[in-house]
Structure formats: structure tokens, C-alpha cells
Image (cartoon, grey):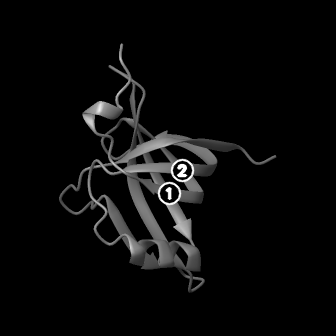
Amino acid sequence: MTTITTGIFFVGKDRPNRPAASEHVNDAGEYVLKVRCIDNQGKGRVEGYIVRWVGPQAKVWRQAHMDLKAGDILRLELENPRSIPGSTGMPETHATVRTCELLSARSPSDAQAA
């Protein structure tokens, strides 16, 4: 059975030799968009995700969002998320993107009162 998860994620920061968003063509000749994301669930509950979106829809989406940057907000529907040890020793979750929507940044007035 396929595991599906949905949520709001933030585009991660670029790192040396590890951009937040990258693209390539896989061995099957398919376009692949890879994005490093953060799932921020509150203080001390931040998880890294590496998500891959394969196919022509990913390419069209990327071409429309070439200015994607750290902190941008994505609404993602992900398939088969799996936690594995990351390159820094911390776990990171890998998943395949089913749908992706770039959300507009929230202004301070959009924040809910505590």
C-alpha cells in the first residue's frame, strides 16, 4: 500500500555543493527536480526532507518557478516518505512528489493570534 503525506514545507538553504533545488535527467531520460525542504513543527521539531519530482509536470513547474529560494513555502503531497541517515548524521526523509504548490509568503497580519 502506498503511503501518502501532505503538508506545508519550507525550501531549505543552499549549501556548498548541495543546492536547495537541483535538476537532472535520470537514466530513463526523465526530468527530475530535487528539492531540499524543511518540515518545521515547532521548537526542536525540525525535520529535513529531500523530495524528488519526476516527469514533464515537474519540468513545467520548475520553469515557472526558477526564482525558488530558501524559505519559500510549498504545499506538498508526497508518496512513500522514508527516513534514512543523512549526510550530516541526522535523519532525513526522502519522498516522491505527487503534487506541489508554491504558496505566497505570509505577512505578519496573516499570523494567527496566540
Q: Residue at x 60, y 45 (%)?
A: 81
Q: Position of residue 20 (x, y in %)?
A: 31, 58
Do labels 2 and 1 touch, CB within 8 Å?
yes
- In the rendered image, the quadrant that contains the C terminus is top left
Q: Position of residue 47 (x, y in %)?
A: 41, 34
Q: Residue at x 32, y 72 (%)?
A: 66
Q: Amino acid at mark 2?
A: Leu
Q: Amino acid at mark 1?
A: Glu
In the rendered image, the residue lying farthest to the bottom is: 29
- Label 1 CA crowd tier, 10 Å (few <14, some 14–19, many 20+): few
Q: Quadrant of residue 40?
A: top left
Above or below, 7 relative to 100: above
* Left or right: residue 104 compared with residue 26: left
Q: Residue at x 40, y 78 (%)?
A: 63
Q: Position of residue 105 (x, y in %)?
A: 32, 47
Mark 1 lies on residue:
101
Q: Position of residue 1 (x, y in %)?
A: 82, 46
In the rendered image, the residue lying farthest to the front is: 109
Pick the residue in front: 103 or 91. 103
Mark 2 lies on residue:
76
Q: Nearer the viewer, mark 2 or mark 1?
A: 1
